[in-house]
Image (cartoon, rainbow, N blue to C red):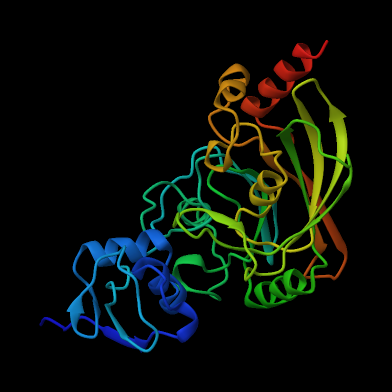
Amino acid sequence: MSTLPEVRSLPVPEGLEGERVDAAIARMFGFSRTKAAELAAAGKVSIDGAAAGKSERVRGGAWLEVEMPAPPAPVRVVAEPAPGLRIVHDDEDVVVVDKPVGVAAHPSPGWTGPTVIGGLAAAGYRISTSGAAERQGIVHRLDVGTSGLMVVAKSERAYSLLKQQFRDRTVDKRYHALVQGHPDPLSGTIDAPIGRHPTHDYKWAVTADGKPSVTHYDLIEAFRAASLLDIKLETGRTHQIRVHMAAHRHPCAGDLTYGADPTLARRLGLTRQWLHAVRLGFEHPGDGDWAEFTSAYPADLQHALDTVRADSQ
């Protein structure tokens, strides 16, 4: 049985008078500029009933009509091994894992690779059923290209208590990042809101209307071309460390998505951002005691660190 596409119409606010169609759609309907342009190119946008291209200018009070894209197909958890996933701690309430690069936290549209919860399911772990179907038990995430520690809830009580700790910002999440150049000051706080990138669906950026985001950093070691930082997150936005460091002109080494130098990445042998979740501490949901775990650098990050250190001697 076929269904008609959803069409939404809104009057253009006077404040958007003269804006391009793709910019107006992005502001009014919450899409990125890239997605808005794709909709216009596909003939899914009209102004007062007439088809509109992405570069046309809108008039205040005109009716902007958009055929909304179909929602993504639901994703499901597939129990399959996650190569390199290491169990750091396991009890009746939580399982702490050391996630390797190339493994996602949970399934998502467009991702067909291994996941933490798929790997746990394949290994016979039963986790909390709280949360969306594709991310049950997941209380926080790491990027596919970021390695390190994650905690997954196994009981419903653990899920609730851990989520509350993340909301209250009492979880101690520590990362080490090798960033290009030398931040000034060498230790400090970056307090800058983060939202969707205006033109790239897969990226995030410091934006005036983004969500509050706070990153604290301290210098561990300085090299000729880079600095090794200890980073503590006060908030947990997607790509937060990568976005904040790039916005301050010190992207993580190897992070080509956010402007890292490809020449330095090749010299260090990096095929991903140098970013690792080295420590994770939280109040254990079972007994209330403080639990803390650490993770050593993976081989690729250690090699890059040894190389940049040798280059500085």
Task: Answer above or below: position of 259 versus 104.
Answer: above
Q: How many marks?
A: 0
Tell me which residue sits at (55%, 42%) in the image. 145
In percent of width and height, residue 163 lies at 69, 73
Q: Decide if residue 37 is on the left or right side of residue 234.
A: left
Task: Answer above or below: position of 237 versus 275.
Answer: below
| Front residue of 305 and 17 | 17
In percent of width and height, residue 66 lies at 28, 78
Task: Answer above or below: position of 277 versus 6.
Answer: above
Q: Quadrant of residue 47?
A: bottom left
Tell me which residue sits at (58%, 26%) in the image. 270
In percent of width and height, residue 246 lies at 66, 44
Q: Decide if residue 133 is on the left or right side of residue 4.
A: right
Q: Decide if residue 24 is on the left or right side of residue 310.
A: left
Q: Decide if residue 7 is on the left or right side of residue 297.
A: left
In percent of width and height, residue 119 lies at 49, 50
Classify the position of the N terminus by image quarter: bottom left
Tell me which residue sits at (81%, 23%) in the image. 223
